[in-house]
Amino acid sequence: MDRDTPPPADPSAPVRRPSRGLFAALRDHTFRSLKHRNYRLYFFGQIVSFTGSWMQNAALMWLVYEKTADPVWPPLLLVAQVGPTLVLGAWGGALADRVPKRGLVFATQSAFLATAMLMTLVVAADLVEPWLLLAVQVVNGVVQSVDLPTRLAFVSDLVPRPDLINAVSLNSMLFNSARAIGPALSGLLFLLADAVIRAGWLPGSRAVTLGAVWCFALNSLSYAAVLFALRAIDVAGEPRRSALPAEGMLGGFRYVLTRPRLAGLLLLTGLLCVFGWPVISLFPTYTDQALGHAETEYSVLVSSVGAGALVAALTNATFGTVGRRGFFLLAGASVTAAGLVALAAAQSLGAAVLAAGSLGFGLILFLSTGQSAVQLSVSDETRGRVMALWAMTLSASAPVGHLLAGIAATTWPVRWVLAGMACGAGLVAAGTLALAARGWRRDS
């Protein structure tokens, strides 16, 4: 053998692969959708906008309660915001299938900007009345009935199909991040407003009013980010007409009814939200009656749900595939049920925190996987209408679940209520197993 010729490689020797850094792994797997310019613009614009929206919502709840001292008004404002989606969501989805989605989202975000500016001026002029805030929330709800299904359907225009699961998971991640950051920033602004008034810089002002003005004003500014992103996004082409025999608002219903597994997934999603999400509204009672703690511990439990949700979104973004979605759906429903059982049995704050984190993880793992499964199972021509049904399912299940949980908690101990909710989530897990057993992948 020639001296300059290297010896042949030993086939039994392990193959050495070049090491990959953490940053490269995150870029190529967890955040791979961000390599697409359109989605990258949309993602960072939505981060700013969602944070501002959650900051405004938190300030609005404090403001209306301070104005009325009536615990009925805050949930009433929430119902006014989500209710129109339940009624008009199908119409909003049909509109998304007929009108260019980028322009439609630009119009709805501009409408949100206008109502945020209106609330800023109303509160700054000390013209706040509960009925006026309720009316503005109804307007926001009508706009949301078009905005939500259109934004859900718009994601598929920003990334290629292989990255759609990742993009949906990243959307879930940024939404839950904003839900944690926005209210925290609102609380800081209220504290700052109180310090300013105590220092005598703005005599005659009230901390709640001043803090709310700052929150509404910053939310107005936050829409500039998403509007700039939408203007910079380049999505060519008009939406294609539906090939369904009957077009319009009922097209989404007909599409889903011809696909039993898709209809089953929507039903299971609604049931899991009915049994899972109401735990948030039970946390004050649970913290006081079951754990014997107060406001600080309540905040820790809420933050634990958010932390678990973020981990679930990152998990789905990193490891989510078409082949794994059945397992992820089953795991999400099962972990949700286990988290509720653990909450019902927890005797310490530490155990309750772990249970709350598990609950948040299970819910978002199921919901982000379910949303991507729906996205991949529908045609482009009917995507807006079917995603409107997804939005309507979430909008309907939230108020129903909170109402039932509140009534139950006034009748039975909160631990019993949580145990009953765990049984409901367990039934959803069983239904998910049956759905997967019938071969979910064939519906694609």
Image (spheres, helix red, strand yellow):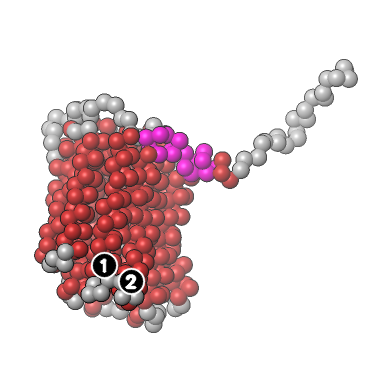
Q: Is residue 282 above or below residue 314?
A: below
Residue at (78, 30) in percent of width and height: 10
Residue 301: image x %, image y %?
A: 40, 69
Nearer to me, 85 or 48: 48
Name the spot of residue 325 as percent of width and height, x first. Answer: 41, 44
Crowd class of label 2 (few under 14; some 14 to 19; many from 20; radius 10 Å): some
Residue drawn at x 34%, y 81% as measured from the top left = 289
The furthest residue to the top = 2
Residue that mark 2 sits on? 196
Q: Is residue 336 visible?
A: no
Where does the image place residue 412, in percent across and percent down from the top left?
27, 78
- Crowding around mark 1 (Cα neighbors within 10 Å: few <14, some 14 to 19, many 20+) is many
Task: Using the numbered discs, state the Cα–Cα distance from disc 1 to disc 2 in whole angstroms.
Answer: 9 Å
The local secondary structure at tag 2 comes to helix
Lower sequence index among marks 1 and 2: 2
Q: Is residue 283 magenta?
A: no
| Magenta-highlighted residues | 25-40
Q: Main secondary structure of the magenta part?
A: helix
Q: Amino acid at mark 1?
A: Leu
Is-magenta flag for residue 37?
Answer: yes
- For the C terminus, give its image quadrant: top left
Residue shown at the point (12%, 59%) measured from the top left: 135
Direction from residue 14 to residue 53 in the image, left or right: left
Q: Which mark is residue 210?
A: 1
Give the residue type at disc 2: Val
